[in-house]
Image (spheres, rainbow, N blue to C red):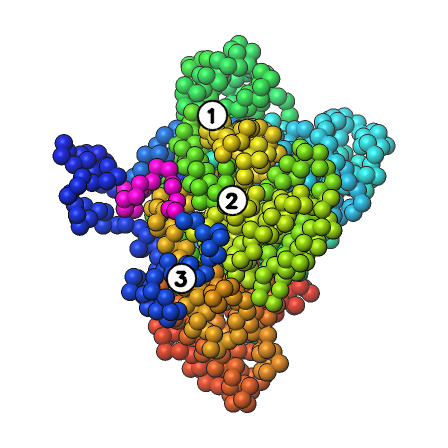
């Protein structure tokens, strides 16, 4: 990502080595430094773990324990305990400071070679405006939030995401856009699934063979899992505007009554834009849908897909200010026609109104959320890149329509200049172009051209057939153009005026307006943009304000030292398909993380490719399917999912082509072993796997987990363990030792990558040795050779030797955020990671203990202990006081808190997870707020407060509500706004009052409304 410098003033520790004491040694000589005099002063673990040693002692005492080990022994089943320290390769036992570890990582990053990449293929150089870089990407006020489930305190990012949707809808010419998807390839796969859902019963999908290869490969993986017949075919000239089109659709499309959709790339992977109106006509006559993968910047000049007749547009917004980062994270997009809204994947931000009639934003059509639909879901809402979408939308607002068009014209100008500059030395593929040309050298071999470019610090695309590709971008300079011309022609003397490209043909030239909303015309100066960013930031509650105790979401500290490397140029400006010798630093990073995560989980191998937790679930299930197929067990398609499993599991299972069979839990929250045995026996011939969350989503370490795994294995199935609750396992127990065969890890939960308001995330999977050969591959760059994976634990086959197809567009998913988790593990070390887990468990049990006298608690393990989260039962309040769990959630906003997870996994409850990084004072503040709310509920129950007009029903209270001239409520303004004394000192005012969700669904608006509505 954009450039920042290494730690200032760093002097290598080796410079201090003497003949008497080697300070680089992991152990000091006997008698040297007995008091740790020379240990670093900036050791990280005490800064990450919130409670002090004294506070840890107080919390332990409240629970009746003397040490963290005593609490651990009382909580985690003895049968699964890891009774040794983690052995994390390369990390010594000595304490290391943040400054030192940052310097080590910068040395690693320096092994990457930052060439000028003109490879294209959906990845381009871009300039992140510094005002956006510093104030969004590097700002915890933007990157520490979670998915905007509590819309009243998320109005800033919701408006920013609505801007993104408006930008996508305008540029693609399709009026309904989503709030981002993971990457272009997965967006195309989602569009394919959407076509199959819209044209139910049709199972054939056609994709043009000139789409990006990584897109076609990801689609193959998805088509196989969904039982779709994906055919990759050339588009006949007649259907791309190059010849008279035949009149019979069946002459063009085989079995048209079976086709649900067709994908084309516009412009295609070679850079040529075709007139696809004949194709659209033929496909529509066949009753199918047309999907166009496209480039938003190109669409400032080219006729948009919607105007060509496309039904769905997908692509990546990466070049809108989000650097390549070796593949991600970047915000993908999808847009379509309003009649398909119920079939759209992912999230949609909509416009509604609040209780005072003011415009308010919220996530629309939430009935599609996988937590609600579970096994009936057709997509997974956890497929989003909110932070990156926000950056892309701000980039469009900063430049405006005129600025974007200027950038596009400049880029096309460079492409035209190249075409003129290589005349006589190359054949140039004919056609309408934007930023990319495909050349066939006439006077030099392709190898000579590529070698000459490499010697000049330039990467070009090798098509493998004697042609090369050159893609220009926003960062291109005149010097770059001259260097490319010299490499291609071998002539360094070509100079003179740059030839301009000819005008676009009438069919291709965009004539419609775009980005006409005032938000795209009002922030073109840095001062205006800065104030707009901070105005929106002030409408969002983030971890910069207070704890976010969302159960199963693990909202822990995203430390500054972990975040700094994200914007180093050595990580950010690398093309994912750059040669391996330019990515040696990344390769070391991958090896370290794979090794550390393997040790932490107890698995033989790890794949870093899945770029979201949902993708990790999907990838793990696909690996299990491939394993069964390899053994001839082709009929295994049943996935058992306990009621206590994580909410995304059923949706992932459906997308992976499995049939979901629920398994009951008992009154203590444990999996009902009798029901599990019965279901496993009933489906033994078709049993593919069990998806189990551990500890369970009920917050319980189930004693019978080993037996659960054995039951599945006895009936021929595999055990998939959801890693959502890994923050209760690290250093204490390991999924691989417990009996799981595959487990995904949420690096954005346990390993400190920020949630970014609902993305980015990373969901690597760890697998046992017998599943390692099936880990996801990639058609462009192998994710195995570059990271140096080797067989382990007796495996006779190398990881990836029988690889499934890729699940992400880039071979390593989103590499530019992996340094965050590398820093966390390296800074914490084995002992720090274990202590973090123990303190997370301590904090949860301490809070549960304090709340137990005020609220009923659901589910505990042995000794009455919980894991790292617990569930508060609020169901009785509906009958006793007319108070629902939503009312408690909204009232917490008045105290300055985001609500815990509502109504999941049990309706009418709150699931609370404090994490290890919240200090005791913050835990107590939250508990005090919950106790005060219980007192307000009791006042309603006792008749001291009105059942309809009370602080909970009217929450949240905005500043205009409290300062209004008239106050008609039976409680005071003070009680509304400052219910406890400390609230006054740290008050967070919700920007809007309670939002009317039904109104928003009845009047669906998913783009920026006119300014007169504000």
Nearest to the observer: residue 94 or residue 29: 29
**Which residue is rendered at x = 67% and y = 32% of the image?**
630
Q: Quadrant of residue 236?
A: top right
First-in-chain label (1 vs 3):
3
Of the numbered discs in the image, which one, if any, rests on residue 579?
1
Q: For residue 978, say whether it is visible.
A: yes
- Say which residue label 2 marks: 736
For label 3, the crowd category at 10 Å Cα-Cα, with few meaning under 14, some 14 to 19 and many 20 or more, is: many
Of the numbered discs in the image, which one, if any, rests on residue 356?
none
Q: Quadrant of residue 634?
A: top right
First-in-chain label (1 vs 2):
1
For label 2, the crowd category at 10 Å Cα-Cα, with few meaning under 14, some 14 to 19 and many 20 or more, is: many
Residue 555, above or below 181: below
| Magenta residue check for 101 | yes
Q: Are marks 2 and 3 in contact (CB under 8 Å)?
A: no
- Residue extending farthest to the top is 443
Q: Could you say whether the residue bearing mark 2 is in a helix, strand or loop?
A: helix
**Which residue is rendered at x = 46% and y = 55% of the image?**
78
**Which residue is rendered at x = 43% and y = 49% of the image?**
82
Of the numbered discs in the image, which one, if any, rests on residue 71?
3
Q: Could you say whether the residue bearing mark 3 is in a helix, strand or loop?
A: helix
Please provide percent x and percent y for residue 1.
42, 40
Please provide percent x and percent y for residue 127.
44, 39
* Range of magenta residues: 84-102
């Amino acid at each position: 990502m954009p450039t920042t410098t290494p730690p200032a003033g760093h002097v290598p520790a080796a410079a201090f080595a003497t003949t008497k004491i080697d300070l680089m040694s992991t152990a000091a000589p006997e008698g040297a430094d007995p008091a740790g005099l020379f240990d670093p002063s900036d050791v990280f673990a005490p800064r990450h773990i919130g409670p002090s040693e004294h506070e840890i002692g107080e919390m332990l005492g409240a629970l009746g324990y003397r040490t963290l080990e005593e609490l651990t022994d009382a909580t985690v089943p003895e049968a699964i305990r890891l009774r040794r320290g983690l052995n994390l390769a390369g990390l010594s036992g000595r304490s290391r400071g943040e400054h030192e570890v940052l310097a080590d990582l910068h040395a690693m990053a320096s092994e990457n070679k930052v060439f000028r990449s003109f490879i294209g293929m959906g990845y381009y150089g871009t300039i992140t405006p510094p005002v956006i870089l510093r104030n969004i990407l590097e700002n915890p006020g933007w990157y520490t939030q979670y998915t905007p489930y509590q819309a009243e305190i998320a109005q800033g990012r919701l408006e920013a995401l609505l801007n993104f949707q408006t930008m996508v809808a305008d540029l693609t010419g399709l009026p309904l856009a989503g709030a981002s998807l993971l990457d272009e390839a997965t967006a195309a796969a989602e569009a394919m699934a959407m076509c199959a859902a819209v044209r139910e019963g049709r199972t054939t999908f056609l994709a043009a063979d000139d789409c990006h290869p990584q897109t076609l490969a990801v689609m193959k993986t998805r088509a196989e899992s969904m039982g779709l017949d994906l055919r990759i075919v050339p588009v006949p000239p007649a259907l791309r505007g190059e010849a008279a089109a035949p009149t019979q659709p069946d002459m063009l499309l085989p079995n048209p009554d079976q086709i649900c959709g067709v994908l084309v790339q516009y412009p295609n992977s070679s850079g040529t834009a075709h007139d696809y109106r004949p194709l659209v006509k033929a496909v529509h006559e066949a009753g199918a849908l047309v999907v166009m993968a496209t480039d938003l910047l190109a669409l400032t000049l080219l006729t948009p897909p919607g105007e060509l007749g496309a039904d769905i547009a997908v692509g990546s917004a990466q070049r809108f200010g989000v650097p390549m980062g070796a593949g991600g994270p970047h915000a993908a997009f999808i847009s379509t026609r309003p009649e398909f809204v119920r079939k759209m994947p992912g999230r949609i931000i909509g416009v509604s109104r609040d209780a005072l009639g003011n415009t308010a934003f919220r996530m629309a059509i939430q009935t599609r959320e996988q937590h609600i639909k579970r096994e009936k879901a057709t997509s997974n809402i956890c497929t989003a890149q909110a932070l990156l979408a926000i950056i892309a939308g701000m980039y469009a607002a900063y430049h405006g329509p005129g600025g974007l068009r200027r950038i596009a014209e400049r880029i096309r100008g460079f492409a035209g200049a190249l075409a003129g500059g290589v005349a006589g030395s190359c054949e140039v593929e004919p056609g309408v172009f934007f930023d990319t040309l495909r050349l066939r050298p006439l006077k030099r071999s392709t190898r000579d051209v590529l070698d000459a470019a490499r010697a000049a610090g330039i990467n070009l695309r090798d098509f493998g057939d004697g042609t090369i590709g050159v893609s220009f971008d926003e960062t291109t300079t005149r010097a770059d153009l001259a260097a490319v011309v010299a490499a291609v022609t071998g002539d360094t003397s070509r100079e003179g005026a740059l030839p301009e490209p000819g005008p676009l043909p009438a069919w291709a030239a965009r004539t419609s307006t775009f980005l006409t909303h005032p938000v795209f015309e009002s922030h073109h100066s840095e001062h205006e943009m800065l104030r707009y960013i901070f105005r929106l930031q002030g409408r969002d509650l983030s971890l910069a304000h207070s704890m976010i105790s969302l159960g199963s979401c693990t909202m822990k500290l995203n430390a500054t030292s972990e975040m700094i490397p994200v914007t180093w140029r050595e990580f950010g400006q690398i093309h994912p398909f750059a040669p391996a010798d330019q990515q040696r630093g990344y390769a070391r990073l991958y090896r370290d993380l794979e090794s550390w995560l393997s040790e932490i989980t107890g698995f033989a191998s790890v794949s870093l490719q899945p770029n979201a937790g949902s993708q990790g679930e999907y990838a793990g299930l696909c690996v299990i399917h491939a394993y069964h197929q390899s053994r001839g067990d082709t009929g295994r398609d049943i996935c058992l999912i306990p009621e206590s499993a994580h909410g995304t599991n059923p949706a992932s299972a459906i997308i992976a082509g499995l049939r979901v069979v629920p398994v009951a839990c008992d009154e203590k929250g444990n999996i009902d072993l009798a029901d599990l045995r019965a279901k496993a026996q009933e489906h033994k011939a078709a049993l593919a796997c069990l998806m189990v969350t551990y500890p369970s989503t009920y917050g319980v370490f189930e004693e019978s987990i080993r037996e659960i795994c054995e039951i599945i294995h006895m009936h021929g199935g595999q055990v998939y363990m959801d890693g959502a609750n890994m923050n209760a396992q690290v250093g204490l127990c390991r999924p691989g030792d417990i009996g799981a065969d595959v487990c995904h890890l949420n690096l954005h939960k346990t390993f400190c990558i920020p949630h970014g308001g609902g993305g980015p995330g990373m969901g690597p999977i760890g697998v046992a040795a017998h599943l390692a050969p099936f880990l996801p591959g990639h058609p462009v760059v192998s994710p195995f050779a570059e990271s140096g994976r080797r067989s382990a634990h007796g495996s006779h086959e190398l990881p990836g030797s029988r690889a499934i197809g890729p699940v992400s567009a880039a071979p390593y998913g989103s590499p530019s955020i992996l340094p965050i988790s590398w820093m966390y593990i390296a800074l914490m070390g084995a002992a720090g990671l274990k202590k973090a887990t123990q303190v997370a468990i301590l904090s949860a049990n301490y809070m549960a203990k304090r709340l137990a006298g005020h609220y009923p608690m659901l589910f505990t393990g042995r000794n009455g202990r919980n894991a790292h989260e617990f569930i508060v039962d609020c169901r009785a309040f509906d009958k006793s006081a007319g108070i629902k769990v939503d009312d408690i959630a909204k009232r917490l906003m008045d105290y300055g808190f985001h609500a815990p997870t509502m109504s999941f996994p049990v309706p009418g409850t709150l699931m609370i997870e404090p994490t290890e990084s919240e200090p005791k004072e913050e835990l107590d503040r939250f508990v005090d707020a919950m106790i005060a709310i219980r007192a307000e509920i009791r006042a309603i129950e006792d008749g001291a407060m009105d059942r309809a007009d009370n602080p909970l029903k009217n929450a949240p209270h905005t500043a205009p509500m409290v300062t209004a001239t008239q106050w008609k409520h039976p409680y005071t303004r003070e009680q509304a706004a400052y219910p406890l004394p400390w609230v006054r000192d740290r008050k967070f005012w919700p920007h809007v009052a309670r939002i009317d969700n039904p109104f928003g669904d009845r009047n669906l608006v998913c783009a920026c409304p006119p300014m007169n509505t504000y």
